[in-house]
Structures are given as structure tokens and as C-alpha cells.
Amino acid sequence: MTSTIILGAGIIGVSTAYYLSEHQPGSTIHLVDASDKLFSSASGYAGGFLAKDWFQPSVASLGALSFEEHRRLAEKHSGREKWKYAPSTAITYTQGGKKSGKGSSADWLMEGSSRAGAAGQSVGNVVDGVTLPFWLKGTEGDAVDALGAAEGDTAQLDPLLLCQWLLEQCRERGVQIHHPATAISISKDVRDQLASVRIADVGTSTETDIPATRLIIAAGAWSGRVFASLFHNSGVKIPVTSLAGHSLVVTSPRWKGSPASEEKLGCHAIFTSGATYSPEIFSRVNGEIYVAGLNSSTIPLPDVQAGFAKPDPACLSIIEDTAKQLLGEDGLEIVKEGLCFRPVTPWGTPIIARVKEEDLGIGIKTRPGADGGVFLVTGHGPWGISMSVGTGLVVAELVQGRPLSADLSAVGKYH
């Protein structure tokens, strides 16, 4: 059985390992991550908003597949209790009926814009009966608009809890977990084909050659660095940069959560506009409220081995002011602070592709078909959580040579 190494144990990596392990022994799958603490970036600090049809045509089938897979997993494995999965009502909210700041934009990758613009023609369509959630502090003259084409086309979850569940499933199936560890080199066989990857264990300072003919690079915003470190002679530079985002998780006496017995209370995704940025606010079934939207493409991507960058207190203060303004100050408590780095591409859609042999560098080949290959899976931007399980499913199919459940014809570009 062909062994597979996945570099990057974030939500894309663990999802891929999960679906690979349904069709090959877990012991032949190796997850490698350089972080001291897994899920320390977007996989653990993102908002967890899910959409079915807010995507460009090139990734529409992948987005829809992933949304339905999220729903299926939650229904089959008690996702509401285990990772706080719940259907959500998505709305735009404008205080006083007057928009300020940059507002919504169809290009949600632009700094300061809102991905609510990705909902397309539904943005701005006032729907009778749409009201503010009771936990949001409203004022006279506020405007509320519905987002999404149909009820049930948005949802949300706690991404950290989903990642932890997926990882535990992988462990139970025998998937090998290496962290903190880095891939430092590759080896070839007599036919110049990829034969093994040398892994350095950061904690013990030991090195191990793991026989493998399939390599998947799913290291998020660090994927370009990982590819360059292993394929020195390649003339290809992977165009993945990072979009940093600050966030707060808060609790408020106005929102006690929505247990299964009171599902009618529902969760909400609120997209609004501020003086300098476009806040996003998500209520979760466990009583938490996630506040974010302050993004930047200028914060340097840290060296993961040196530890992740610390949140900027000034940025957190801005988000806290937003939370107090929209949720009320009485009883508001901060339970988690975050700074994460989302991988983005110049064209705004992910990279899911097998790397051509000529792009690996002189003298490096891979076994043909499902027996080998080097694959890139990155660049999902703010939609990494939403597209995660669908991506893992399709990548497993791609690597194992099975029919694909989504159209990947427009996401094979990597330079």
C-alpha cells in the first residue's frame, strides 16, 4: 500500500487524512506539522461561518459539496454537541440606516471589505419579517437585510472543536501524527522517483526517513515556503500570501446560546460596516459570540517554528469597541483573543492540484497515477473552514485515483 505524507495538520490536512483513511490503512498516512500546538492559526481561530453558494463559479461545486458534507457529518456524528454545528441566519445590519466605512464588497479579499458581498444578488434585498437577533443592541432606524439565496444555505460551527474531532478520528484509524516536526528533505529511488521524506522531530532533535511516494502540501499560508524548502531546483514559486485577521470570542448576558431543545432561537451571522472596517459577528449555540473582520495583508507571516505572532493590542481594542457598541457593555466578557493567517492567491480561489513533474525540479519524478505524486492544497482564503471537509474529500479522491465529487478543472493553477 502506497504511503502518503501530509505536510500541514490544519483543518485541510486533517480533513484530507480523515477521508484518505476511509480507503487505505491509517498507518500508511502521516500528518506532519511544525506547530508546538496544533490548530494555532486559522483552523483554531476562524469564525466557522459556512455558506453553500457564496462562491465564484470556479469553486461553486466544491463549496456546495463541502456545505452538504458539513451537514452530513454533523447529522451522523452529533456535530451540534461535539463542534457546535448549527444552521444560521445571515443578515447585513446597518445602524441608523446609513452605511459607513468601506461596507460590503464583492471582493472580500480586499483589506477592510466584507465577504457578505460574495452572497451576490441577495445582498441588499430586504425581506419582510427579517429582524435583529435579540442579543444585538439595536437603535432606531436600523436597516436589516437578508443574505443568502434560500433558508438553510448558511451555518456555523466552532472550527477548533471540529479539527479536534477529525484529529481524534484519524488517531483511532491509526494515522501517524508528527508534531512539532518539519520535512527537511526528500529522497529518490533508482528511477529518480520520490521514495521518502526526511522528517525532523523538533522536540527530540531526531531525524527519520519515512518511505512515501505521495506527498500532499497543505500548510496553509506556509505552503509556498514548504514547497521551496523541499524542491530547491524548481523554478516555480507558489503564489500564496497571507491575510491576517484579528478576532475576539466574547460572552454576553443577552445571548445564552441555543441548545437542541430550543433550536428555534437559532444562530446568526451579522455582517455590518464600521468607520474603518467591516465587522463580522457570529453567535454560537454554546453562548459564545465571535467578533472579527479586522483583516490585513501587511502583517508579516511568522516563522511557524519560532512561534506564532501575538495579536496586536490596538487591533483587539478596535474589535472590543465594536463588540461593546453592538452587543452592549453590561456583562460583556472576553474569553479568547486571536490572530490567524489565511492563505490567499492572486486570483482569489484555492489551489488544488497535482504538481507537474517538470515543475518539481531537475531529476525529480513521481510514480504515475494513484501510486505517487506531489499535490498542493492551499489558498482557500476566508473560506477555508467552509470548504474544508469538501476539499479533504476531493483531495483524497484525487490522490487515490477515484472519481471526483466536485469539479476541480478551474483550481489546478499554481503559478
Image (spheres, rainbow, N blue to C red):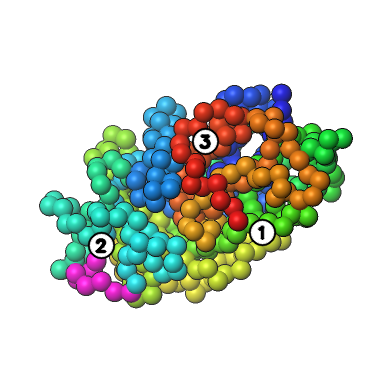
Question: SS at mark 1?
Answer: loop
Measure the C-alpha gap from mark 2 to mark 3: 36 Å
Q: Which residue is mark 3?
A: 394
Question: Earlier along the polypeptide chain: callout 2 or callout 1?
Answer: 2
Name the quadrant containing residue 152: top left
Alpha carbon of mark 2 to alpha carbon of mark 1: how far? 41 Å
Q: Is residue 153 one of those drawn in magenta? A: no
Q: Residue at label 1?
A: 237
Q: Secondary structure at mark 2?
A: strand
> Which residue corresponds to mark 2?
93
Left or right, residue 38 beside residue 271: right
x then y, percent, for residue 383: 45, 51
Contact (Cβ within 8 Å) of mark 2 with mark 1: no
Specify start and end residues of the magenta stretch as a single range: 93-101
94 magenta-colored: yes
Which is nearer the eye, 175 or 360? 360
Q: Where, quadrant-wise, is the C terminus in this rendering? A: bottom right
Amino acid at dot 1: Lys
Q: Residue, x 19% and y 69% (percent of image)?
A: 97
- Mark with earlier residue (3, 1): 1
